[in-house]
Image: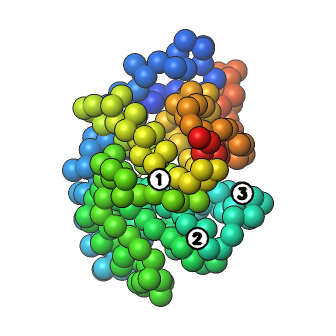
């Protein structure tokens, strides 16, 4: 995840020597890992939405939502499946899911402004019945459970960038995810900061790798890489 002023993972997902792939040391903490950053960002996006109806940033673009929806179709995820959008931001993915026919949706975010923005966006789409809650995923302590599908687009990335307790945060994330998913429930993660190999390493206990969703690749300096990784896991106990 990058912003205009700082690169958080200089090499993107370009293939790297094995020892570097697992090292978090090249992963510099960033303001994108703080609640203050997101609160400020969504306050501004909320004002813009109220002014001109623009929902703001679609992280990793529209295609990042379409590819997960295509997978959900192929996997025959039923319309009444309980689906959680972890770190929902402006709620744009919830809108896409609802418009695709999914009826049992919940979005959570730890930024109050994000929650207000998502609620406003959903209401404007006539989807005010979709539940959006202010909640820190790392502190949800059993409040989130029995989901058939958990979706993450950029939230594990943000959590990984927290300047304090980075390793602890990642461990808490995995714990919370295990608690939120039903046995054999699916986890769809889209990340720009972690490679497939690193994500497989992180979600290796309590999860089974299902498949990688194709994402655009690029070539740089004789190496091939992907700007984002999109992986599906299944919760196994
Ligand atoms: C890169 S944005 C992605 C937002 C949204 N998923 C999207 O694709 O547009 C990261 C989101 O994660 C949220 N977030 C970060 N840490 C969180 C936490 N511990 N609990 C809940 N939400 C969190 C931020 O507030 C922000 O909305």
Q: Is residue 91 above or below residue 16?
A: below
Residue in the foreground of this view, choosing between 71 and 63: 71
Residue 154 x %, y %:
47, 48
**Residue 214 falls left or right of residue 194:** right
The image quadrant that residue 123 belongs to is bottom left
Q: Is residue 158 left or right of residue 85?
A: left
The residues tagged by marks 3 and 2 sit, at their Cα atoms, a distance apart of 12 Å
Q: Position of residue 79 (x, y in %)?
A: 65, 74
Residue annotated with mark 1: 180
Q: Which residue is mark 2?
A: 97
> Is the CB atom of the residue marked by disc 2 within 8 angstroms of ligand 1's nearest atom?
no
Q: Between tags 1 and 3, which lies in front?
A: 1
Residue at 36% over, 28% down? 167
The quadrant the N terminus occupies is top left
Upstream in sequence: badge 1 or badge 2? 2
Task: Report which residue position mark 3 lands on.
Answer: 71
Of the pair 52 and 154, the residue shown nearer to us: 154
Count of labels in the image: 3
- Earlier-in-chain disc, 1 versus 3: 3
At 44% from the left edge and 83% from the top edge, which residue is drawn? 129
Left or right of residue 221, residue 171 in this image: left
Q: Is mark 3 within 8 Å of ligand 1?
A: no
Write the residue at 26% across / 65% down: 113
In the picture, the disc for residue 58 is: none
Real-space CA distance between mark 1 and mark 3, rounded to the nearest whole angstrom: 20 Å
The residues bearing labels 1 and 2 have C-alpha atoms spaced at a distance of: 19 Å
């Amino acid at each position: 995840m990058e912003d205009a002023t700082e690169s958080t993972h200089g090499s993107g997902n370009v293939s790297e020597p094995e020892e570097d792939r697992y090292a978090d040391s090249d992963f510099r903490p960033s303001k994108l890992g703080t609640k203050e950053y997101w609160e400020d960002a969504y306050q501004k996006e909320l004002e813009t939405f109220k002014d001109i109806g623009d929902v703001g940033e679609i992280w990793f673009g529209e295609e990042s939502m379409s590819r997960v929806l295509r997978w959900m179709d192929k996997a025959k995820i039923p319309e009444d499946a309980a689906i959680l959008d972890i770190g929902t931001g402006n709620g744009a993915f919830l809108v896409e899911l609802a418009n695709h026919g999914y009826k049992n949706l919940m979005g959570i975010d730890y930024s109050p402004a994000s929650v207000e923005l998502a609620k406003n966006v959903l209401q404007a789409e006539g989807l005010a019945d979709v539940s959006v809650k202010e909640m820190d995923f790392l502190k949800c302590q059993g409040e989130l459970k029995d989901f058939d599908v958990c979706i993450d687009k950029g939230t594990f990335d943000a959590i990984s960038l927290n300047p304090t307790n980075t390793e602890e945060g990642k461990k808490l994330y995995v714990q919370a995810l295990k608690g939120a998913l039903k046995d054999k429930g699916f986890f769809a993660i889209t990340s720009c900061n972690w490679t497939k190999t690193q994500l497989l390493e992180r979600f290796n206990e309590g999860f089974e790798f299902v498949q990688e969703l194709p994402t655009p690749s690029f070539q740089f300096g004789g190496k091939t890489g992907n700007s984002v990784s999109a992986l599906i896991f299944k919760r196994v106990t």
